[in-house]
Amino acid sequence: MEILIQLEELTMFVGCIYLFSRLNLKWWWFPLLLILPDLGMMGYLVNPATGAFTYNIVHFKGVGVVIGLYGLAKNNRKLMLVGIILLAHATMDRAIGAGLKYPDGFWHTNLSSKVFW
């Protein structure tokens, strides 16, 4: 079952690559922007609870979907890009087994026992 879930996440990641391609941006933007959501880890400099909150906000797939759809509704390519990148990053993380964080520590996630690495 774990492999099936990881394949599902990988499929969504490929879908995000397709959506990115529809924005007609230079391809080098995708890998560059793809790492930005990990800035959400900066909250861990304050404490684990703050870190979990900031990390989870940018890694919750619903945030990416809502921002992307809002950008689509407003015909705003920048918001569509933000939504696509947030969703792509979250699905990429889930595909390798990295999940949302609990407030007691960085390594305690909803997928703790399933981390690929």
Image (cartoon, grey):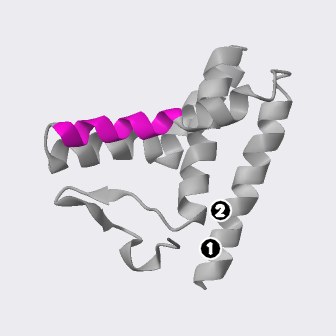
For residue 111, what is the image quadrant?
bottom left
**Stretch in magenta:** 36-45
Q: Which residue is mark 1?
A: 5
The answer to whether the residues at label 2 and label 1 have Cβ atoms under 8 Å apart is: yes
At mark 1, the secondary structure is helix
Q: Is residue 116 left or right of residue 106?
A: right
Determine the residue positioned at 60% across, 37% down. 34
Relative image position of residue 22 (x, y in whole percent): 86, 29
Determine the residue positioned at 51% across, 44% down. 62
Of 110 and 41, nearer the camera is 41
At mark 2, the secondary structure is helix
Relative image position of residue 102 (x, y in whole percent): 25, 60
Count residues near mark 1 (Cα–Cα under 10 Å), then give few for <14, some for 14-19, many for 20+. few
Determine the residue positioned at 64% across, 80% down. 3
Q: Is residue 74 left or right of residue 114?
A: right
Q: Which residue is mark 2?
A: 9
Relative to 28, does residue 115 appear above or below in the rendering? below
Q: Is residue 5 left or right of residue 25?
A: left
- Does the magenta run of residues contain 39? yes
Q: CA distance from mark 2 to mark 1?
A: 6 Å
Relative image position of residue 52 (x, y in whole percent): 26, 49
- Does the magenta run of residues contain 90? no
Q: Taken as a whole, is the magenta stretch helix, strand or loop?
A: helix
For residue 25, what is the image quadrant?
top right
Q: Amino acid at mark 2?
A: Glu
Q: Amino acid at mark 1?
A: Ile
Residue 81, label in figure: none
Relative to 102, does residue 42 appear above or below in the rendering? above
Q: Is residue 68 left or right of residue 60?
A: right
Relative to 86, does residue 109 appear above or below in the rendering? below
Determine the residue positioned at 47% across, 72% down. 115
